[in-house]
Amino acid sequence: MNLLSVELVSKRYGERLLFGDISFGIHKGQKTALVAKNGTGKSSLLKIIAGLEPPDSGNVTVRNGITVGYLEQSPIIDPTKTILENILHSNDPKLQVLMQYENAIEENNYENIEKLLPLMEQHQLWDAESKVTSILGALNLTRVNRLADKLSGGEQKRIALAGLIFANPDLIILDEPTNHLDLDMVEWLEQYLSGANQSILMVTHDRYFLENVCEHILEIDNEQLYSYDGNFTYYLTKKSERISNEETSIEKAKNVFRKELDWIRRQPKARTTKSKARVDAFDDVKKDASKRIDKSEIAIDFKSDRLGNKILELHNVGKSFEDKTLFKNFNYKFLKGDKVGIAGKNGAGKTTLVNIILERLQPDTGKVVIGETVKIGVYEQKGLEMKKDQRVLEVLTEIAEVIEEKEGKVVDAARLLEKFLFTRKDQHKKTSTLSGGERRRLYLVSVLMGNPNFLILDEPTNDLDILTLNILEDYLKNFDGCVLLITHDRYLLDKVVDHTFIFEGDATIKDYVGKYTEYRASKKQLKSVAPPKQEKETKENPKAQEKNKLSYKEKLEFEELDKLVPKMEEQKEKLNQEISSGELSVEDLQNKVKELGKLTEEIDEKSMRWLELAELYQP
């Protein structure tokens, strides 16, 4: 069943044609990705389909009774409402009850909880409560009763995403849904969308996400739309075949064109009926022979300054904010050619570590030593600050008029911009007219123009198209200097970095050698390993080793807790299922909620004790 039909839709941006007369449909349950270069109209097409922007021509038809949900790249939520109100955003009395219940849970207001239990039972809201709790937990949305007036762009994106998932529309339209999500959230969303029954149309630069969720690809290329019934790998293969076939067809058309052109030049002015038909057909041949396949690619061949022996060293670095310790006693010495990834949950301290390295923050303990030859280039989430009415070319000429490339050639700013797919005409555009991806591309060239030998990249994949990401990936792999890469893009991590600093929220930073996806796959099997310094002290000091051993009684306690806590977790899950079943009386429901609260406290207490003993346990 076709839920959505796009018929002969065209759109211009100023004088530029983004796409012309494109048509396609989205079927029930179909999961489709839209792929194209930056600035070719991906976001514009999504807005047209969502009804937020009119096409210049053509029609978009949504089947009667079908609900559509749209997640923008940078959604703006209502600052006068709480986080929960923005997620539920409904005047439905049932959802108002659910909202009051969630607020009571967050405030640990057991009196209100007991008052609301009969209403929750009456309106059969336990499934909805379970769903909203799951979404809030997965997207790390806490203190949901606070006003949304001072939230970051990332928090607003997560709130808008939570609201969309909770609303459960028939057709979900997503514009870069993984931006501002940490890796745990990306994997949760990937799993959720893969198993969802809804139809999905998305734009994403995340290649693993695209590969695992979508089975249908639409591509805008040279103002035309191409359709591929398969995943991302299938699309890459078939696109290559398409371009090869087009090149063959164009070459054949050129051969025919040359023959027909020679024939026309030799013909007398007086035409027969037969020759007139051949002349008319010549126009079609000329059109086919004049086609061009756009093979323009970004060319990154900057020369980086030489690095000395001392690069960047972190000695016992630690940082806390209020009562939260982000990391402590972190040591690392960068070597030539190091490609290091940084991964972890939002708020774990990734950006804090980078700010300490950049000397924007002082560590609470330890120090950072930077070598004299180190020249750091920084690419940040906030992007490049551009002056009002500044033109593209002016952004670069303010940094430098010329730059030296690897081969020793010197190129000026205009030629450099052409290598980053900004035509001479584009270079005189005002930066305010650029798409999000074009602004990011301009930012990237401005960073690399400084010839850095140590690159720090904070979420460089946001808003960049897949073509640009492939070229950036190759550049980083072959970069002579060091790279420190913060990203939620698992594909980029796997392809570029040698090892990863893992922030797991336990105040330690673990250096994992290997691909990030290998770490995720083996995470459950990984055991805690003491820092090298502590291991050395233990071997050299038998008394210290004796001190770290558990007593016989503590060992028995640890082994008992190791069995007990999982059983308590199973009991907790069973209670949650009973509470959510809707089959309990009000009195039984109240008792179960109290029992759940008490059990949760016991689990927390025993888990903390297990962790204390686990640090000393030696089998």
Image: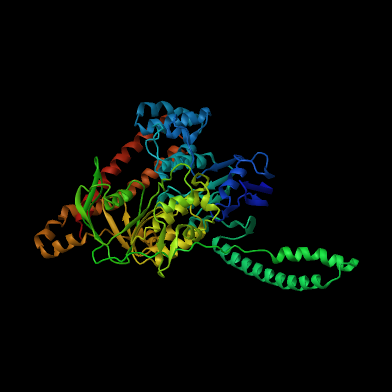
Quadrant in which residue 423 is drawn? bottom right
At x 43% / y 47%, what residue is drawn?
180
Question: Total label count?
Answer: 0
- Residue 535: where, in percent of width, then height? 18, 62
Q: How far across and how far down the image is residue 126, in percent?
A: 47, 36
522 horizontally vs 429: left or right:
left
Note whether residue 409 is visible.
yes
Work out whether 53 lies above or below 113: below
Residue in the foreground of this view, choosing between 57 and 301: 301
Residue at the spot x=38%, y=26% of the render? 112
Q: Residue 309 location, x and y as percent? A: 24, 67
Quarter of the image where the C terminus is located: bottom left
The front one of 435 and 95 is 435
Q: Nearer the viewer, residue 549 or 168?
A: 168
Q: Which corner quadrant of the image does residue 487 belong to?
A: bottom left
38 relative to 262, above or below: above
* Percent position of residue 231, x then y: 56, 60
